[in-house]
Amino acid sequence: MTTLEQKSKLLSRWLRHRPDAIGIEIDKRGWVDVAELRLKSAGAGVVLTEDELMQIVVENDKQRFSFSEDRTRIRAAQGHSVDVDLKLPVKKPPPVLFHGTLQNFIASIRRQGLLPGTRRDVHLSATKQTASEVGARRGTPVVLLVETFPLLRDGYRFRCSDNGVWLIPNVPPMYIQFPDK
Ligand code: HQG
């Protein structure tokens, strides 16, 4: 039996990284046809009823998924590694944003700045607490601080996903404040 949480994780994987795993098509804006998703998912042995899908979207702790207005399509709000452009509008960020990471990455981040890795963008959080939780997924978190005004002044643009994650293509080291220790 696949639990709802497992189904939600599979959905993250398919909609962000591996549509090919079940043969669904993601359009340029990240949307997948719900009927096709349900059909292909069932074909791969994971039955997603309409109610379950609705529950996954509505109750997801981070609001990771959105339906199109007519509910015929679904997409992940952020975090893609597949080549999509969600066409999120540019938005003015708060003065300070945070990035949660691990000590092991700090030397590299000091040299290269924040890079998106396999994803489309670097993810920044509006609160220190959220950044700390992002870092804590993998170990003891280290929270970096990013002042947004100097980045805006220098031509960088921010976007914000439907679920409140701040996105930027990269952040060079000179804009990052590292903890002292
Ligand atoms: C690190 C979760 C070395 C970066 C969260 C991070 C988030 C570098 C890791 C979302 C580096 C990439 C994304 C550099 C960045 N050298 N390491 N130059 N630049 N890094 O998972 O931001 O639960 O791709 O610090 O809530 O950790 O999946 O990114 O540690 O919003 O919905 O490279 O994933 O959302 O890791 O997390 P990730 P992230 P979900």
Image (tube, rainbow, N blue to C red):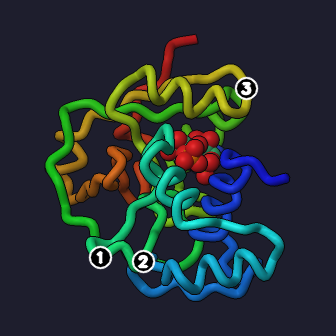
Picture disc at residue 164: none
| Residue corresponding to mark 2 | 73
Which residue is farthest top? 181
Relative to 63, 56 lies left or right:
right
Picture disc at residue 139: 3
Q: Quadrant of the C terminus?
A: top right
- Earlier sequence position, callout 3 versus callout 1: 1
Amino acid type of disc 2? Arg
Using the rendered image of the protein, determine whether residue 62 is visible from the camera's viewpoint. yes
- The quarter of the picture where residue 164 lies is top left
Query: Residue 83 appears at what percent x and percent y?
Result: 52, 79
Categorize mark 2 by other alpha carbons within 10 Å: few (<14), some (14-19), many (20+): some
Q: Is residue 130 above or below residue 56?
A: above
Nearer-the-camera pick, 98 or 18: 18
Q: Is residue 73 above or below residue 167?
A: below
Q: Secondary structure at mark 3?
A: loop
Picture disc at residue 70: 1
Query: Residue 95 appears at what percent x and percent y?
Result: 19, 32
Amino acid type of disc 3? Gly
